[in-house]
Amino acid sequence: MTSLEEAETEETVTCLHMTFYHPCQEEKMMFRCLNVLRREQVRADELAKFGRDSNICRYNLMDSRVSRIQFSLQFYRKLNSSELCFEIKNMSKKTKLFVGHTELGYLNKTDLPQKCIICFGEYQILAEVQEGESMDYFHTRLHLSDVPILQERRLPSPHPVPESGIYSAVPSQDRSPTETDENKS
Amino acid sequence: MTSLEEAETEETVTCLHMTFYHPCQEEKMMFRCLNVLRREQVRADELAKFGRDSNICRYNLMDSRVSRIQFSLQFYRKLNSSELCFEIKNMSKKTKLFVGHTELGYLNKTDLPQKCIICFGEYQILAEVQEGESMDYFHTRLHLSDVPILQERRLPSPHPVPESGIYSAVPSQDRSPTETDENKS
């Protein structure tokens, strides 16, 4: 038998794609410590923390307006289900965290929908969960967007408000992760 | 003004009392690394982990049958409420965790009721939350019990099963934290 035949069946891994946008990102300062476009492996027992303090946070935002820990993500399995999902918790005393329409105060938490927009201060993050089977760890893959993720609807529109809420995600060709790279943004 | 008059109003701190029992605790081995009866302060952004691996777990159970991380507790605030509470998550792939009647598999999680019994393997833990106001941290206080917390009802009883479930907590005079000390157990 070849080693391929002998190898254990490979499990797929849940991957959380996060596309970041900030109006002042041209200066490239706040995102300079993010490992953009590289898959990072996070153990299931770890909290993935995002914030200013690099001693505590794995994902570091270099911005004095960002809290030491801004928010954290935990990976878990739903009761009586095999579904693996994420929960997001606001760890900032100063800033509200919005997950879709849900406003989170300090220490509030909520499930992360399969696809949603996370906002705090002037930051906008499009979060998309790509399902996997592994229960030992998950992956994150960060992207940067040149264009806002949240689009304000200033003009009255004859079309109904989409299910996803007051925002409309930017056209997919503009925010496709594969088309955004570190050099571009 | 005296320093007492100038001082900020002191906040009460949420305290989680946990009374541990194991049938083989006479040997005192598994609980020897627990800081019994001492209040420990845990930051709100920390996961309180219980398990065998002292490099990862703040609360260490010295027992080869215990998982590296057996379970974790997170402190959070309920949405649209000022209520501070705990969530427990089973971090063991091998052992089920029971919280009252709820069975948790690996990575399953549930809210910790104000008073409940947590079981895994032969371990029994009575958990009681004493409410507080501080959102920055909480306290834990561990106790040991000489008598089982879960009592099997072997004889058919004319009385209805109590609301608390199939178990009946040991009489309060037997499990009162103030009456159990390190030397006794």
Image (cartoon, coloured by chain):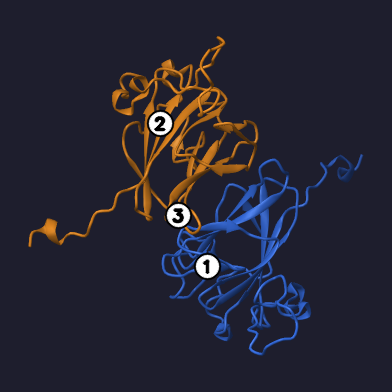
Chain colours: A orange, B blue
* Residue type highlighted by circle 3: Asp
**In the image, which disc is placed on residue A106?**
none
**Dot 1: chain letter:** B
Q: Name the residue under label 2.
A: A33
Q: Where is residue B44 in the image (x, y as percent from the top left)?
A: 62, 48
**In the image, which disc is placed on residue B97?**
1
Q: Decide if residue B55 is on the left or right side of residue A121.
A: left
**Mark 2 crowd level (few <14, some 14–19, many ≥20, 10 Å Cα):** some
Is residue A172 placed above or below A79 in the rendered structure? above
**Mark 1 crowd level (few <14, some 14–19, many ≥20, 10 Å Cα):** many
Q: Residue furthest bottom?
A: B155
Viewer-side label of 2, 3 = 3
Residues beneath discs 1 and 2 located on the same chain: no
Residue A62 visible (yes or no): no
User: Do the numbered discs 1 and 2 sit on residues whose CB atoms are within 8 Å?
Assistant: no
Determine the secondary structure under disc 3: loop
Q: Where is residue A99 in the image (x, y as percent from the top left)?
A: 55, 34
**Dot 2: chain letter:** A
